[in-house]
Image (cartoon, rainbow, N blue to C red):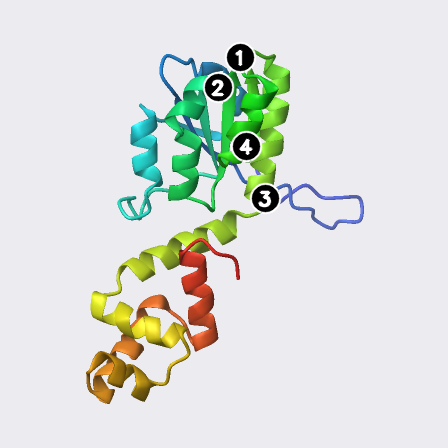
């Protein structure tokens, strides 16, 4: 007779055969110039990562721009730029990506790069380096190390994204009040500084707290710092 029960041990107790599914890293991969990104894609699939192949570096930078990014788009854990070292450096793809998304793990897969060039790429913001050509085993190992490290900070990265979107919803008038709040000014002083009524300051302050989902000034400061890419 068919049974829906899990496997039983000798004592008659049941043991669940279901295990939590491993968390898959999400990798955005792009070939820069004429570079072939397929070795990185194959290695990423070998470590069971979800791979999204960007059509161009420009399109990937547009995706990294949190102001234009779709709220439904799952943020990547690792972004990999594949290209000739000299080209990656001169085009500043790593530096530009790091500026747009400082919270992300950005890696570079360098083709024929020297030690000096690798150091330069790291200085531009790369948190992981891969070298091409290389064996699938080596690429897979290096990608796993990079993605495992990135996964540990997935929750904090997504919080940064959430706070950035919330901060982008503040109006210019609310930003003026926010500046006073962050400077530690009481409502009356903010009102005097902006030449507006005290009640107006109170209303704007309430809207700021609501939009940022902050329950205290200390929490608001923490959220704003996160939105601006600062720690704390």
Q: Earlier in the sequence, mark 2 or mark 1?
A: 2
**Residue where numbered disc 2 is placed:** 85
Local secondary structure at mark 3:
loop
Instruction: Report the residue marked by disc 4.
Output: 122
Q: Are marks 2 and 4 in contact (CB under 8 Å)?
A: no
- The CA distance from mark 3 to mark 2 is 40 Å
Is residue 153 in sight in this rendering?
Answer: yes
Q: Residue 49: image x %, image y %? A: 51, 30
| Mark 2 vs 1: CB contact within 8 A | yes
Q: Residues within 10 Å of mark 1 (few under 14, many from 20)?
A: some
Q: Are the residues at dot 3 and dot 1 in contact (C-beta closer than 8 Å)? A: no
Q: Residue furthest right?
A: 11
Mark sitting earlier along the chain (3/4): 3
Per the image, label 2 sits on a secondary structure element best described as helix
Query: In the rendered view, would you say 50 is above or below 185?
Result: above
Residue 20: mark in rendering? 3
Cα separation between marks 2 and 1: 7 Å
**Residue corresponding to mark 1:** 112
Within 10 angstroms of label 3, few (less than 14), some, or many (20 or more) residues? Answer: few
Determine whether 166 is above or below 121 in the image: below
For image coordinates 32% across by 61% down, the residue present is: 167
Mark 2 and mark 4 lie on one chain; the one further toward the N terminus is 2
Q: Residue 27's spot in the image, x, y percent?
A: 46, 32
């Amino acid at each position: 007779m068919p049974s829906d029960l899990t496997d039983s041990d000798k004592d008659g107790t049941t043991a669940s055969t279901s295990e939590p599914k491993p968390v898959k890293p999400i990798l955005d991969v792009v070939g820069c110039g004429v570079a072939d990104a397929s070795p990185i894609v194959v290695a990423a699939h070998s470590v069971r990562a979800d791979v999204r192949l960007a059509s161009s570096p420009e399109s990937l930078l547009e995706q990294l721009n949190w102001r234009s990014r779709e709220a439904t788009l799952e943020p990547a854990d690792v972004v990999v730029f594949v290209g000739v070292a000299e080209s990656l450096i001169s085009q500043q793809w790593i530096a530009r990506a790091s500026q747009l998304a400082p919270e992300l793990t950005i890696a570079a897969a360098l083709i024929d790069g020297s030690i000096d060039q690798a150091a330069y790429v790291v200085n531009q913001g790369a948190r992981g380096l891969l070298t091409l050509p290389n064996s699938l085993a080596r690429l897979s190992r290096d990608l796993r190390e990079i993605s495992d490290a990135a996964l540990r900070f997935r929750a904090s990265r997504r919080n940064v994204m959430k706070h950035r979107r919330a901060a982008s919803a503040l109006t210019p008038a609310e930003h003026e009040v926010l500046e006073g709040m962050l400077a530690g000014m009481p409502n009356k002083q903010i009102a005097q500084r902006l030449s507006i009524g005290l009640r107006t300051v109170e209303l704007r302050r309430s809207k700021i707290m609501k939009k940022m989902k902050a329950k205290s000034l200390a929490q608001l400061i923490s959220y704003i710092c996160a939105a601006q890419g600062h720690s704390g």
